[in-house]
Amino acid sequence: MPWQNNDTEDGNTEPGGGPQANRPEGKPSNPWGEGPPRRPMGNRGQGRGEFDDLIRRSQERLKTQFGGGGGGGPGRFGGGPGGIDLNDGRWLLWAGGAIVAAWIALGSFYRVDAQEQAVVQRFGRYVETTGPGLHVKLPWPIDAVERRKVEQINVIDISSSEGGNENLMLTGDQNLINLAYAVRWKIQNPENFLYELRDPEKTVREVAESAMRAEIARASLNAALGPQRAQIADQVRERMQELLDSYKSGIDVRGVDIKQADPPAAVDGAFKDVSAAQQDAQQYLNRARTYAQALVAKAQGDAAAFDAVYAQYRLAPEVTRKRMYLETMEKVLSKVDKTVVDAGNVTPYLPLPELRRRAAAAPAPSPATPPATR
């Protein structure tokens, strides 16, 4: 700040006013050493002059930057009656009011999208949860808003590719299995999701691994590889939901998908051979069951036919017996040459035509073969 200087008769000047001749002899101008003495606190006139000088310099800088015209007196910004008197403190009130109004207008409204919900916090404490639309709140930093997409399905993949290691688990029959699965979840309660869990995604991953290992430990290797994969996935989802609800996590588990279930890589070849042998054995069993079912069906049909004949036999035993005898003889003698001779007054019949036919069909003897001699 500038200091007011008073010239003395001998040409020396001393800041702060007054010649050195008026000072006591032998006393320095500054009791703390060389230099100008400190300005008394009660010198209000000098402070007012310094403040006017500061306002004047600020006005000149503003005119230079904003192109303010002449015509304004000292302490005014801009010319004419519309100029701002910088010496008047009311313009500070107007500027502060405008800033506060803009702060309130811009910070009192917020918008929530269709798939979101917003959590309103007042000085860091939960106030309310709002749905989609335009809402009103107190300006920042009084109220703060955090939006979360509650309709978005999040997916966490847990597979053997993470870290380059296999995701091995122990089955109920003391075998190892390499699993790769995915967990689908979404936010159900934004308030609990924000305040109850420190790292929600990490919590979901760890809960999924814990639930999967617990269910695999109750199942056999063959069941986990194929027949019960869907059932195991449903049980893992239920167990995960129970654990997350106990944590008040605000998370809804939508499903668990087992994408891969293989034996460890070290025994994969031997396991494939065993699986092929099991499939062959199952194929042979299926063929045997098919053949057995066919025999059983045929036997049941024969038994039903016999029961029907027996029912007729009981009604007329003699007639049925003779009919069965004739039918049986017809089946036996239908494909053989025969002569039926009935005793009584019937002249026996010699089937000469049949004998001639047989003689003609017999092969002739070879000429190179010598006749047989007795």
Image (spheres, rainbow, N blue to C red):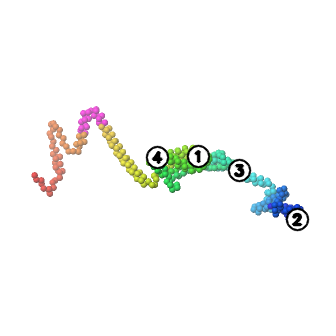
Residue 95 falls in image quadrant: bottom right
Per the image, the residue denoted by label 2 is 8
Nearest the viewer among 332 and 56 is 56
Q: Relative to residue 61, is residue 142 depicted above or below? A: above
Would you call the spot at circle 2 few (<14 residues within 10 Å), some (14-19), or many (20 or more)? some
Residue 291 falls in image quadrant: top left
Where are the magenta residues, as a range?
Answer: 307-327
Q: Regarding mark 1 in the picture, which secondary structure is present there?
A: loop
Tag in front: 4 or 3: 4
Q: Earlier in the sequence, mark 2 or mark 3?
A: 2
Nearest the viewer among 70 and 245 is 245
Q: Which residue extends farthest top?
A: 315
Q: Regarding mark 4 in the picture, which secondary structure is present there?
A: loop
Q: Give the image location of residue 197, x and y in percent.
A: 60, 48
Per the image, the residue denoted by label 1 is 249
What amino acid does circle 1 point to?
A: Ser
Q: Residue at x 58, y 45 (%)?
A: 247
Q: Are marks 1 and 2 in contact (CB under 8 Å)?
A: no
Q: Relative to residue 60, is residue 289 depicted above or below? A: above
The label number, if any, that marks residue 172 in the structure image: 4
Provide the major secondary structure of the magenta segment.
helix
Total numbered circles: 4
Per the image, the residue denoted by label 3 is 104
Would you call the spot at circle 4 few (<14 residues within 10 Å), some (14-19), or many (20 or more)? some
What amino acid does circle 2 point to?
A: Thr
Report, in whole angstroms, how far the alpha carbon at label 4 lies from the one at label 1. Answer: 31 Å
